[in-house]
Amino acid sequence: MMGRTIFIDPGRCIGCQACVSACRECDSHRGKSMIHLDYTEPGMSVASLPSVCMHCEDPVAPCAEVCPADAILVTADGVVQQADTTRCIGCSNCVNACPFGIPKIDLQAKLQMKCNLCYDRTAYGLAPMCATVCPTGALFYGTLEELQAERPGVQVADSFVFGDVVVQTGVAMVVPADKVQWPVPGGLPVVEINGKDVR
Amino acid sequence: MTATDPSKRASLPIDPSIAPPGTRNFRDAGGIPADQWHADQNGETLVPTHCCFCGVQCGMYLRVDKGGKVFGVEPRNHDINRMRLCPKGINAYQQVNHPDRLTAPLMRRSRDEEFKECSWDEALDFTVSEIRRIQEAHGNDAFGLLGGASLFSEKTYLVGKFARVALKTKHVDYNGRLCMVSAAGANKLAFGIDRAGNPFSDILLTDCLLIAGSNVGECFPVMTQYLWGARDRGASLIVIDPRETAIARTADIHVALKPGTDSAFFNAVLNVVIAEGLTDEAYIAAHTTGWEEVKKTVAEYPPSRSAEICGVPASQIVQVARVFAGADRAMAWHARGIEHHSQGVENCLSVINLCVATGHIGKPGAGYGTITGQGNGQGGREHGQKSDLLPGGRSIGNPEHRKQICRIWGIEESELPGAGTSMMEMVWQMQRKEIRGLIGICNNPFVSLPNYAVVKDGYDTAEFHAQFDFFLSETAANAHVVFPVTTWAEDEGVMANAEARVVKHNKAQEPPAGVRTDTWVICELARRLGAGKHFDFPGSREVFEELRVASAGTVNDYYGITYDRLDETGGIVWPCPSTEHPGTPRLFEDGRTYHPDGKIHMQVVEWHPPMDAYTEEFPLSLTTGRTVAHFLSGNQTRRLGALVEQTPRPWVEVHPSHGFRNGEPVRVVTRRGSEVFPALVTEAIRPDTVFIPYHWPVPTSANALTIDALDPRSKIPEYKVCAARIEAAERVDEVPAPPTPPGREAYPEAQVSRTDPLPPTAPQGRGTAERS
Ligand code: SF4
Ligand code: SF4
């Protein structure tokens, strides 16, 4: 079972971008936000959701897998770190490989940047900045048990299907109970992605 | 579960350790305490304080470097917000050492001249000589004072005292007049006390939450954790708003009524409650007066009639009545959406009538609240800054109250002026040359008052205008003298949040050279006007001691609140009559109100149409409001890169039925003028309504279009509805780029000139979130 991680609950997000502002305050990439806020149906609804690094686990995080310079390290507890500045050559392979569109390249510095789950905070048992400030709990940091204790009956998914590829992630999404397709080993369900039926 | 499910009537179980979602999870996570990050790094210190902006008053730490300069923010595990912050709170610290800060007084003898920096003596002497000149020629009341609800309560107390004792004028008012005075008036009429009845935490205990006229997600984001906490327990959510806001999107019932029809709606809801026998007759009989008259009036508002007025299905009215009245514990919170009207007080009273008639009052999870816009919107009027109030909420017309205050202030009763007029009325008086000189303290009427042309004319007509501020606001740019004063991080003082919880802000850094506290400037002006002995205050602490005493024994009793107690607690809710008293988070638990008879005085409410009539020429409703990234007139937030990047410019929200494409320039025309905005085409708004956020100055100012009609009782302007039309336009006016925040190379991408006419890409304008 997964340990402490971020759970994203789009149903609660009010689109305030406190997470985006907070991410800029994080000491590891000060002044830049590694979170995007996405709008699911612009013009139709105000629904929004934050995209953080999903810290892919299975297979090895695609960004790390494709990095020719071995700059993206994955810690023993599954956190996919931002590129090691002494190794990164700014080639953008990671940007292209990431199915969630997370890593960014600072073209001038030729350097990749991405969310590292506020490793400087989480290593001490604190929550990442975004999940700390999120006024609504749309970003929740803790264990699945802690989440479920607070939000009875909540369903989450940590597997995403892109065509034929299933990506298992360290960060999980809260999903509507009726969208859950099937349980996968580890006890967590897969959610249908991009209208694709995975059965 | 459907909204009318009878099972909702049974009260939901309450977890005794209930807390807003997510707040229990990382406190005990091991290692260092959750909110003590960085306390020991690089000689950095964390100063506990509160956000300077809205009425939630989130607790935060300011990060102070070895050199004593504020350079960052850390979340703080304070009772109110439990580490949560909105983007304004996170970025607020960047104001403190911003390059735009004013650091020397600015002066000019006429508006044709340029500002020149000058010494404090010159600025103060010139101001005092102008006050003398105007008052000698035209009487004391020819000089006015306008305060602000961003000021600490100590300073608002000083503003009221300075006007009456040093300027000896009756003309003092404050910008809270534009905020929640309708709610204040209604609460005073019904309950004899002007504040929310319940703390935020009661939201977690309720079974049904009704939110009327508040876009909580954007205006009070940190309050959302309480809403979602209530939803986790299964509480129903009813949202009354012409727009489908982030909270309306998830509500059990979203009533998208036509702006300006709120009291017709609430009267009809009460009509159904009575018809279905859902009133709490025992409570009404024991605790109220006026019920028979209210009953008679609401009989005139059957759902069919109100449905027509409000433009909503009658079935929704019935649903709301059943869900609200049928819940074991129900609560109503409201904000500017129902208060900013020429019948703002009546709208609030119609909500109160509903709460009282259903017995939802004075219990954990049952009651009412008003969501304060400004940080000290609540505290700002409690101690005499409002034209008709003396400290402690005393009435300036009441001989007994006048005597009490004159005794405390050491002046003769004959010297104390009577009630003055309201903020908008003072502008009209400036146009008529009845008021010829004005000091404004931390307010920005050029953006915040309705009908900009009138406001500009009024200020331009004034012979002398001085302004206190820490940035050169649009209003300060019109002044003869500008006094550079401190930010909230450079002084200490208290504010009262939307729950009437008094919290203390602490000083995090010394003010920049040349900058003085508002307290110092007011006391110095008083000394030069010959009233020095009444203004011998070295700082906020001494003012607070006098304020405590001045409020003792009143409804707004602060006597038991001390700085030491505030430092030790998460804030104390007044009334607090003694230093042992724990404060009063929930009102009327014993059924008694603050009227002498202890009863709730229910008031008859008749709906009448908005002041600006719809015609063929002006068929639409224009309504205004906030966006999450900006605060009020934007004088502060429009300078902070991250917030500008998030919401660089205003827009007009229009329904797709008008045939505009997203981003097309749209001219919005009202009887006051016309302005061009990019269209944000969205189904989240009624077809007969358009919306513009109001944080920007001309040429993209919502308030160039709004009407300066006032509620006759509260004198709040009718910002939330006026008649308008829209037409295709040529181009969208530019919004200037913000200056660079200091201290680091922060957000260069936000510093580019915003000449690109593209509109926000998403509803609510929070549209700069495309991936980079
Ligand atoms: S802070 Fe939370 S509610 Fe606000 S945009 Fe981010 S995820 Fe959504
Ligand atoms: S603006 Fe209001 S909600 Fe946002 S951080 Fe400040 S006090 Fe909290």
Image: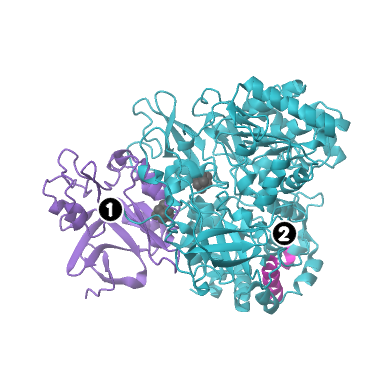
Chain colours: A purple, B cyan
Give the percent coordinates (x, y) of residue B649: 48, 53
Residue depicted at 52% across the width and 70% down the height: B655
Name the element at disc 2: loop
Task: Please tell me which residue lies in front, B519 or B45.
Answer: B519
Compared with B579, A50 (above or below) is below
Residue depicted at 65% across the width and 61% down the height: B360
Task: Please tell me which residue lies in front, B209 or B88.
Answer: B88
Q: Hey, what amino acid is under mark 1?
A: Cys
CB at mark 2 closer than 8 A to ligand 2? no
Would residue B381 be visible to someone looking at this image? yes
Name the subunit of mark 1: A
On residue A53, which mark appears? 1
Q: Are marks 2 and 1 on the same chain?
A: no
* Residue linked to disc 2: B342
Give the percent coordinates (x, y) of residue B590: 70, 52
Give the percent coordinates (x, y) of residue B428: 75, 47
Left or right of residue B607: residue A13: left
Asked whether B272 falls inside the magenta stretch, the response is yes
